[in-house]
Amino acid sequence: MCTRRSSVSKDLLKIIHKIAEVKNVKDIQFNSFSDFSDIDSFASGLYKVIIKGKRDGIKIRIKILIKWHTKVADRLCFREAYRREYMFVTKVLPIFLHIQRTYMTNEGLKVKFPNYVLASIDYNEEVIVVHILQNYKLLNRFYKMDFAHASLVIRSLAKLHAFSFIAAKLFPRDFEEIKRLFDNDVQYSDLNNIPNSLEWYFNASVSIIFDSEIRLKLQHISNKISLILNRCTAPGDKPVDLVFVDYQMARLASPVTDISYFFFMTSDYEFLKHNYDHLLYIYYATLSASLHECKVNAEEVFPRRIFEEHLKKYSILGLIEALISMKIITAESDEAHKMTEMKHQSCNGLHQFETQNQSLFVNRVNGIANFYFERNYSIDHFVSE
């Protein structure tokens, strides 16, 4: 839906003019799209903007993605997330790009990072702006995950994770500062500010698990959910590349937190059963190759044995986040928007929706829970603390 200039809020208009100033574009005209109607996504605070104007007398056209929230209450809720991505842009990304430009010659092992136009954490004016790349698009959340997409994500995660190990080895002083800045979890570090609805969504998933033994195990950790989440971190044609465009939940943690989050949030039982081990092999092989490119030995910084231990120990974090979010990510758009607001806002009380896609919700929850325990992955490390 195209938003006419007259209907754009003053605050968003101010951001657009600031972008034009940064890009040195004069005599601007723009179209703002406040939704993503080309896909089924319930992401909020995103605006696609096309700016037309002149630079040095030459007509130009710029497509950008603005991450910004209209409501003051939402800005408060996501303030720390914007600060986290700002720190990634200003503190981490320059080091990663230096490593890539200086030490890496294999193009297949390089990472495509977002091209940031503007990043600000001025109070109540938090905003992140990136260029929209040609021929890249968000994947519909109801897309049934396939090996081509999953392997691309896993390889990209491995290459991204490699930068942290390389930075720690080559630039230890800088990495100590990164560790300090990214030590806490953005969503769950303040245990007094976690919405009650998160626990309700988790229990809603647990309640429809058919296997009573699995259900009892997960119910046992329900009252410890705040403690566990305080430790966690937190995309027709065959895909050829991807770009991670959101680093608002980035933190220092085991790579397994990202891997398990991706698998359990996007996959069903049959996909995991047939592809999980192969994808883990691809992950570690890609990680090792990326490290080797910079003369870092994977067996020294992250041995395969430790990787396997982390899978058993930390995959629970991805499972828990999936159980919290599954009712939302399997719901129709209107329902998903309502439940997303309840998930992120610090509101009291429990919120129940009988979603239109109840059977999809039940199948996905049972599939990932069964797969997790079939792998003999543990919850004891957290339950015992």
Image (tube, rainbow, N blue to C red):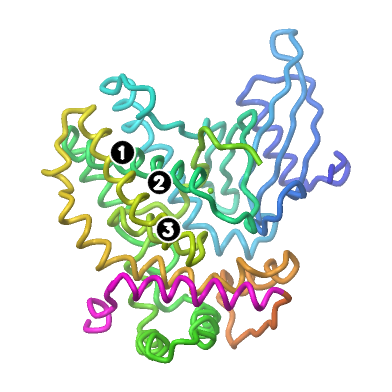
> Which secondary structure, mark 3?
helix
Q: Residues within 10 Å of mark 3 (few under 14, many from 20)?
A: few
Q: Residues within 10 Å of mark 1 (few under 14, many from 20)?
A: many
Q: Residue furthest front?
A: 274
Counting residues from the start of the chain, the first of labels 1 and 3 encountered is 3
Q: Residues within 10 Å of mark 2 (few under 14, many from 20)?
A: many
Q: Position of residue 384 (x, y in %)?
A: 22, 84
Left or right: where 364 falls relative to 9: left
For the residues marked 1 and 2, what is the alpha-carbon distance in whole angstroms?
A: 9 Å
Decide: is 222 above or below 314.
below
Left or right: where 8 falls relative to 191: right
Q: What residue appears at the point 70 percent right and 45 percent down from the top-left corner?
A: 47
Q: Main secondary structure of the magenta part?
A: helix
Return the residue nearer the eye: 101 or 298. 298
Counting residues from the start of the chain, the first of labels 3 and 2 encountered is 2
Quadrant location of the C terminus in the rendered image? bottom left
Q: Which residue is mark 2?
A: 154
Decide: is 94 above or below 312.
above
Residue type beneath disc 1: Thr
Return the residue nearer the eye: 305 or 67. 305
Quick check: marks 1 and 2 in contact, CB under 8 Å? Answer: yes
Q: Position of residue 120 (x, y in %)?
A: 53, 42
Q: Which residue is mark 1?
A: 286
Return the residue nearer the eye: 372 or 256. 372
Q: Which residue is mark 3?
A: 274
- The span shown in magenta is 357-385
Q: What residue appears at the point 65 percent right and 52 percent down from the top-left corner?
A: 140
> Which secondary structure, mark 1?
helix
For the residues marked 1 and 3, what is the alpha-carbon distance in whole angstroms?
A: 20 Å
Residue type beneath disc 3: His
